[in-house]
Amino acid sequence: MRGGSPSGGTAKTLILVGLILDIVFEVILVFAGLALLVVFGLGVILLGFAVVGFVWIALIWLFSYQRVRDGDYTGARTPTLVFAILSLITLALIPGILFLIAYVKLGDAMRESSSAAAPAWGSAPPLAPSFPPAAAGPAAGTRFCSHCGRANAGTSAFCQGCGAPLS
């Protein structure tokens, strides 16, 4: 399902901007790590964080952005919240806030999608027939039991329901 609701599009944009900011941060981290590797030899730690950061970006892309792009707002909502919380904990404040807002917008998109499927307030209900369907009348030669009221074939001598003789 492509396209989707306006809130879904907003969530997709917010997640994409958060991803871009994460990528910029990771590129800066790689360059800082390389510079410190040459100067102090401590850049290995920063490069290790950068590798973890690129894995993090891949996870956000797969579990959040791809699902929103495909219209799976329900499937993207929980991962987006997890990424928001973890981003805030790791001090990636701007992407974390963007992911948190995207989480809220995904909830809006889910409501918009469900309300699009349901009829709107004030719309007329589907037309129903104004009369009940005609019931089939008894076939010619049908005999009714005077004891239980069951309809029986015209050739029956006894009621098929209670066994009483038909008159």
Image (cartoon, rainbow, N blue to C red):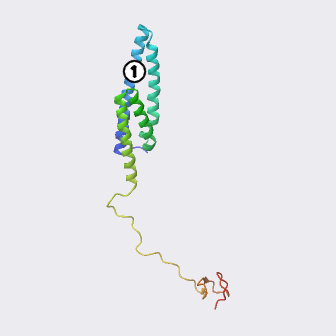
- In this rendering, the answer to whether 27 lies above or below 78 is above
Q: Residue 72 location in percent, x, y?
A: 44, 43
Q: Secondary structure at mark 1?
A: helix
Q: Residue 121 location in percent, x, y?
A: 33, 59
Nearer to the camera, 116 or 95: 95
Residue at point 39% right, 21% down?
27
Q: Residue 12 location in percent, x, y?
A: 38, 38
Specify whether residue 73 is in view: yes
Residue at point 40% right, 22% down?
26
Q: Residue 34 location in percent, x, y?
A: 42, 13
User: Which quarter of the figure has residue 105?
Assistant: top left
Residue at point 45% right, 37% down?
79
Nearer to the camera, 45 or 111: 45
Sort mark 1 into few (<14), some (14-19) or many (20+) by Cα contacts within 10 Å: some
Quadrant (top left, top right, bottom left, bottom right) of the C terminus: bottom right
Specify whether residue 71 is in view: no
According to the picture, the residue beneath numbered tag 1 turns out to be 27
Q: Residue furthest front?
A: 89
Residue type marked 1: Val
Residue at point 37% right, 58% down?
119
